[in-house]
Image (cartoon, rainbow, N blue to C red):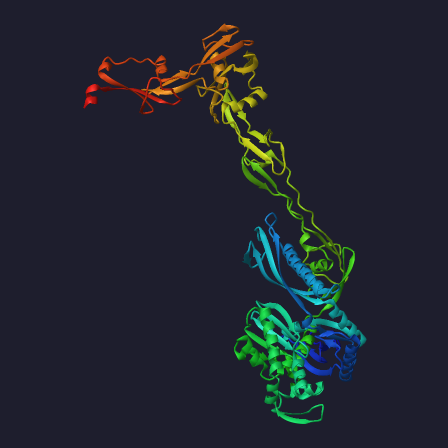
Amino acid sequence: MNNKTNSVHDETKHIYALDIGTRSVVGVVLEVTPTPDGPHYRLIGTEMEEHQERSMLDGQIHHVGAVAKVIANVKEKLEKRFGPIKEVAVAAAGRSLKTKRVTFQQEIKETPPLDEDRILAMELSAVQQAQYLLAMENKETEGEGIQYYCVGYSLLSSRIDGMQIGHLLDQRGEMAEVEILATFLPRIVVDNLLAALNRAGLTMSALTLEPIAAIHVLIPPSMRRLNLALVDIGAGTSDIAITDEGTVIAYGMVPVAGDEITDGLARRFLLDFPEAERVKRTLREQEEVAFTDVLGVSYQMKSADILKELEEERERLIQAIGEKIMELNGKPPQAVILIGGGSLLPTLGERLAHFLRIPSQRVAVRGADAIPNIHLRNRKKAGPEMVTPIGIAVAALEHPVRYLNVTVNGESLRLFDLRRLTVGDAAMAAGIELKRLHGKPGLAVSLLLNGRLRLFPGSHGKPPSILQNGEKAGLNSTIKDGDRIEIIPGEDGTVPKLLVKDVIQEIATLDLTLNGKPISFPPDIKVNGKEGDLLSPLKDRDEVEVHLPTHIGDLLPFLVSSRYLTMPLWKEISYTVNGETKKKGIKKTAWRLNGSPADLQTPIHSGAVLEVTQEEVKFTLQDLLSGEEERRLSLHVHFNGEQVEIPLVRREIRINGIKSENLEQEITDGDRITIEEKPLPAPRFHDLFRYVDYTLPSSYSRQRVELLKNGEETTLDQSLHDGDVLEIRFTPVADRAH
């Protein structure tokens, strides 16, 4: 910059800016004077020169040398008026921008509340995802080699578990989500700009983006909550930017602009391109236009008639712009602002409003005279074509851009500073996966505890270690030229190391009195069906059973192992049955609970008084027979309402060779027992009377006797089956006669 003084308030300086467009290069000089209300601008000089060849296509430099020559000519004209110029502000064409709308999700259910660094990491992870998607698209359509700068992103929404929320700070839930709109600029666009400036003997003092420059001066932040479309209609392309909700939400471009009308004029009236361009510019200013075609034929036509001849081209331009606005915005905007030389085409605004189905007054052409805080010396230089050049110059002062050289983990990087750069930007440029910076939570351990699934989370992952020039920093820390940045990813959390005692919420005991002494019984613990204790280690998917004793029998293992009971609880005898050796444990104790007789199946509860005494219990022949394998030895029927057992076999028992019919006889150690069973004939009705005490009534001779089986009349020879219901019924003869 020139004319700088030591006092900021008294400083008046010149800003030089170039708008390098498809058709021409426009140079402007702004004089900036600080005031208490902000800087005041005066447009004190402009120069313009058109390209002599198609060295620019769609706003992008295709012939560096040719563009540099035009830049040098504009520079020379300005230097004659304002002295040597060393640096200028320029803008990258908005048509080169690529935008991506991306949603990024991260599971947070086992992590601490979200802090600023983790939120920023999520946003930058979304930007990286957008960058990856853009690279994949270009790989398919344009091949390898195109690199992009992220020149900014906007946070569109934040959600927790699918619910939109204002800010993620300190939020908890299961899933956090951010949606961003990221904007990218091809690196080649910037490199070609630098090359062309260098050939013209200039350096870049600042860089901005054409849509951003125009929006900055025409649509201040206070207006960006409105859903507006800014359309810059140049020569080769029309750039579109959409604002809403306080930010720029989308950029776009259509390869149709003022040249579409110029080419139409040239075709219809046989004009060379310069003459067609002159005629087009005159249409708005004059009712009649005179021109001469390439054959030397002169014409004098009304502007309205010429416009009718250009109906097809005009509608094509309107349709392309309107459709792109609808594509970017999803609906008609609240209003449309037109700038650029192509916006001066008569009736363009009215026809675009009709296409978008919005009132015609909602589409307006704005010129440089609509820019606040600027004095225009020449009102002819206040047209819509001057908005972007002046916006570039203003952005150079208010939003200067530079390169930063930093190192990340020893790797040298050059960052393009289109906005405030942070450690997160440097990490992203270094290819560090930001979503992996924070250590992942350790895997949880799942246990089946008393039949219910329980989850025990692993430890939290650790945050990354970030150093900026040797000092602790965060992803949001601002960086400066020459910074040395070290980023060490955080360690993952660990799987929890659990013991049985760690998973029991309350370790209860069963407290009671045994033979006058207080005893506390610990819980019975099993891990995967095997005995365990409070210090047994656990692993994922283990099954743990933890129960307090519920019956007297549950107390025995602890009483014996801890030697609370030293008396023998049982004795073992050995005997044979039909030659097969068998063993039997015989109880030698008697139990009383709260003064009442009890056995091993009696329920127990805390506070109970338990007594156990030595007592000999016999093992009898009846105990043996009841414990033998069940066989069908008899059947049971009902006779006159009483159950009767009828043997099916004849059983003979001998103990040590001596026949025994006493089922209470004790079996002792070494006894030899034989049991013989012989089947009896299948029982019939008359066999019943062997096993019942039944006397016929004295008057039965005067009555009719009926034998019933299961309610139906039968005979004494009828066979019997288990569960039959038998009955003898007497019917008086007189009743029968009646």
**Residue 414 visible (yes or no):** yes
**Residue 369 visible (yes or no):** no
Q: Nearer the viewer, residue 482 or 711?
A: 711
Q: Nearer the viewer, residue 152 or 103?
A: 103
Relative to 463, say whether 588 is above or below.
Answer: above
Tell me where residue 176 appears, x and y as whole percent: 59, 54
Asked whether, in this view, residue 671 is left or right of residue 695, the answer is right
Which corner quadrant of the image does residue 529 belong to?
Answer: top right
Tell me where residue 70 appears, x and y as whole percent: 77, 80
Q: Nearer the viewer, residue 157 or 96?
A: 96
Which corner quadrant of the image does residue 77 belong to?
Answer: bottom right
Question: Which image quarter holds the C terminus?
Answer: top left
Relative to 209, say whether 737 is above or below.
Answer: above
In this rendering, the count of numbered labels is 0
Relative to 305, say whether 521 is above or below.
Answer: above
Tell me where residue 642 appears, x and y as whole percent: 34, 19
Tell me where residue 420 appears, x and y as whole percent: 68, 64
Residue located 40% across and 22% down the image: 722
